[in-house]
Amino acid sequence: MKPTQPPAAERGRKSKLVSLEEAASLVPDGASLALGGIHAHNGPMSIVRELVRQGRRDLTLIPNVSVGMPAELLIAADAVKSIYASYVGLEHQGLAPAFRRAAEQGTIEVRDIDEPFSVYSMRAGAATLPFMPFPFGHEAVDVVRLNPDDYRTVTDPFTGKEVVVVRPLNPDFGLIHVPQADAYGNVRIEGSVVQDVLIAKCSSHVIVTADEIVPVSVTQRDPKTTTIVGFFVDTVVHAPHGAHPTSCHGRYLSDEEHIELYKELGPDRYLEEWIRGATESEYAARVGPSLIANLLEGAQDNV
Amino acid sequence: MSDQPILAEYMIAALAAGLRDGEWGACGAYSEIPMAAFMLARRQHAPNMWWMSGGGGAMNPRCTLVRSSSAYGTLQGAEAVFTMEDVVDWQFGGWRRMPTVGLFGGIQVDRRGNVNMVGIGEYPNLTLRGPGTVGLAFAAHFDRSMIYLHDHNERVLCEQADHISAPGHTDMRRKHVREHSKGPELVVTPQAVFEFGDDGLARLRSVTPGYSEADVRAHTGYEFETSGTVSETEALTPEQLAIIREEIDPHGLLAKVKLGTWS
């Protein structure tokens, strides 16, 4: 099929592509960040590493429902003041050591939330709803009492019963890693979306890092497969293997050995050896093209 | 390979036997055992069961077993993929359409089936910070749930959970939770299977071969009654072992799941 519009129709249209360094420098100290992906999959790792290199401080994290390395590395680097925590851990690879240490020593504020909070606070933020109610029954769960700042109750005007409600959230920045995007911000996700579209809708500024940048004509050939429409996206970065060591669904698997290496070295030594002491291209070279090629092969082999 | 089941296989068969044809089930992270239970049940007595590999949202995955429940492999051969918005909407309201069941674990499970994932100690000054509540709150909305644990010891199986992420059989459940949601039915550990009596307390139902009721008492942090005579947890049939080892887990990932052995 031919593109529906000739390239001339795009004349004068502004590209949203910037370098990784420029994109990270848009994020000021003290900003709130939504982090896309889930567990060891589709994490916005390249921009997380760049924020660590640039020494960002006092961030508030509003991650996806089950976050691993993206939040863990920012916490390890003392970049985080506060985190909305539905789940912070490394799934079958264990607890997240820097998160645990910071939470137990009280050096970060942990706002305990749960999966429905994560989704409904973002949905409320996206639609500018004042709050979002939960179905009856949630009062039996402790998180409602542990976090009275974010969970409240109101009287349901229809039934007169008390109902749990949660606040809306509009993160300053949404950070999402995807397999494919064009220069105007249209995104094609090839695996699980989880809440990446929702993050794009509720955040005030969305930065997409993409393994591959394609011409808009590729988007136009099959618009039904566009997962996030370009006007939700403010900034696009070409970041090959930018999800490593998490997976990029459809492109490469999570690098569990690298995550084990992080645990063995410990947060402080890992940051010095792998992130602060290396640019992103040096990181990629060190991880090794052959390793990523193996992971790529694995992804096609349905392991 | 030995025709003796390994501990993970006993757990898989016990959970699978608890799943029903025609219901909808979900598991979350660190879920090799419940994933295999869903796969086994669908191949045996529950061909009309729907199940979701949590996180990634794959519906009725047909992949061989993977370690991460949100791995890309779960999508290949699945029938649909939920977004997290779909997951939350459905797990709140899906019970209107079909029976729903959740399978999950935690860092503490008490005698009333309350599950804690927040941490150990007084909030907010926890002595052990857990990963967080995630989807456990859906235990207040699913029709029923089953709990699985990788370790059976008196710290995990405790008298009273420090914080309640998934409500068990409590006054708070009776007061607030909608009537369709009945709470936990089973607690499956490497060494034992508990069910819940009418009083809402865990009762020992069966013990894994190689262990005794006395062993279980010594490693459980609360006193418990038994359900009649405690039996041995049923051994897997040759057919079940063949399905697990040849079809569900040909790469032998279950052997890598760390389970407490008391040795």
Image (tube, helix red, strand yellow):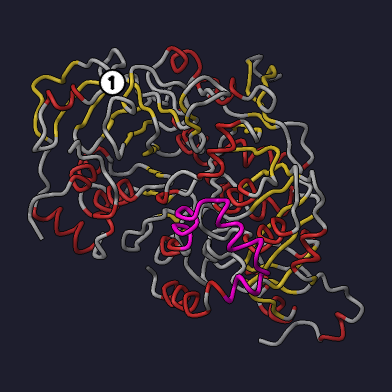
* Residue B25 in picture, x, y percent from top left: 38, 43
* Secondary structure at numbered mark 1: loop
Pick the quarter of the image with the N terminus of chain A: bottom right
In front here: B94 or A26? A26
Q: Is residue A126 visible?
A: no
What segment is highlighted magenta in the picture? A258-285
**Compared to A193, does A98 lie above or below?**
above
**Compared to A151, does A250 lie above or below?**
below
* Residue A125 in picture, x, y percent from top left: 75, 41
* Rendered image quadrant of residue A271: bottom right
Instruction: Say which residue appears at 26% left-offset and 47% top-offset.
Output: B46
How many residues crowd around disc 1 within 10 Å: few (fewer than 14), some, or many (20 or more)?
Answer: many
Instruction: Say which residue appears at 30% left-offset and 40% top-offset.
Output: B150
* Rendered image quadrant of residue A23: bottom right
Pick the quarter of the image with the C terminus of chain A: bottom left
Instruction: Say which residue appears at 34% left-offset and 62% top-offset.
Output: B62
Read off the residue under disc 1. B221
* Residue A151 in picture, x, y percent from top left: 65, 26
Drawn side of residue A5 relative to residue A120, left or right? right
Considering the whole magenta stretch, tell me its main secondary structure: helix
* Residue B131 in picture, x, y percent from top left: 50, 38
**Compared to A1, does B170 lie above or below?**
above
Drawn side of residue B132 relative to residue A281, left or right? left
The amino acid on which the numbered mark 1 sits, given as a three-letter code, is Gly
Instruction: Say which residue appears at 68% left-offset and 28% top-offset.
Output: A150
In front here: B243 or B78? B243
Q: Tag 1, which chain? A: B
Reply yes or no: does residue A226 show up in magenta. Answer: no
In front here: B41 or B48? B41
